Amino acid sequence: MDIRRYARLAALYVGISLVAGCAHNITIAPDAASLTPAKKPNQINATVGLVVTNAMRTQETLTPGGGGDKVAYKPYHDLEFPVYLALSQTFKDVVKFDEAPNEASARAKGLTYLITPEIATTSSSPSMLTWPPTDFTVTLTCTVSDPSGKVIAKPRVTGSGHAGFDEFKHNLGLSAERATIEAIRKLPDAIEQALGTSTAQNGMGAQQAAP
């Protein structure tokens, strides 16, 4: 083999090795306009605290994309505002916290519940030529506690999103955004159902659960 040709092939191989398997940054938060719902007529008459810590916001997740590559994103940073919107649809008032308040502080602020989200995601793509994921799932679990820290309910929802090449070529995180939209739209009903069942077992309605 010609030495120059060999050198070119070797350089090409090294270049491919460096590129293959890299992580591409995306966002999984859709445009706010696609998430802003009207308040539910049967809003729960309670003030809740949404707890998302700075450590949660900076947490980065890697999941598979196409072509052997991965996608990187920060689920709590991206979904904090969508979750806030869903809670605002469900409850009379929502207060954001960077860390969970102690019981005395929570009661002083008139909080009925503290809500801490947990986010799990998956992604995949059969493509060997493009890296954006064609399929994405977002599973959102909200731990609902009273001011003392006692867990009242843990509603969970899952959203799935799909996007083909003709769609995501102008929005590389489209499948993720669609999964987020579906999960967030399910969340208010899931919370109401979980709290209704939980409080009914204690002989009280959700609106009477405040200490």
Image: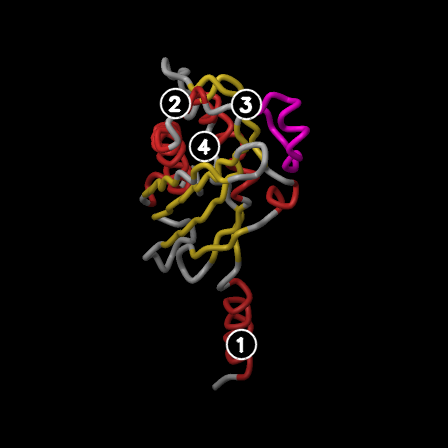
Pointer 4 residue:
30
Distance (Cα) linking label 3 and label 4: 21 Å
Q: Residues within 10 Å of mark 1 (few under 14, many from 20)?
A: few
Q: Name the mark nearer the viewer: 3 or 4.
A: 3
2 or 1: tag closer to the N-terminus: 1
Q: Are marks 4 and 1 in contact (CB under 8 Å)?
A: no
Q: Which image quadrant is residue 55 in?
A: top right
Q: Which residue is mark 1?
A: 10
Looking at the image, which residue is at 46% across and 38% down?
142
Q: Nearer the viewer, mark 2 or mark 1?
A: 2
Horizontal and vertical percent position of residue 145: 52, 36
- Marks 2 and 3 sit apart, C-alpha to C-alpha, by 19 Å
Q: Earlier in the sequence, mark 4 or mark 1?
A: 1
Q: Which residue is mark 2?
A: 205
Q: Residue at x 34, y 32 (%)?
A: 197
Q: Are marks 3 and 4 in contact (CB under 8 Å)?
A: no
Counting other residues with Cα less than 10 Å from the Cα at mark 2, is it few (<14), some (14-19), or many (20 or more)?
A: some
Q: Earlier in the sequence, mark 3 or mark 1?
A: 1
Amino acid at dot 2: Gly
- Residue 9 percent location from the top left of the image: 50, 75
The amino acid type found where label 4 is placed reads: Pro
Mark 3, secondary structure of its residue: strand
Q: Mark 2 falls on what kind of element?
A: loop
Q: Compare marks 2 and 4 and give the one earlier in the sequence.
A: 4
Magenta stretch, residue numbers: 94-111
Residue at image position (39%, 52%) is 123
Q: Earlier in the sequence, mark 2 or mark 3?
A: 3
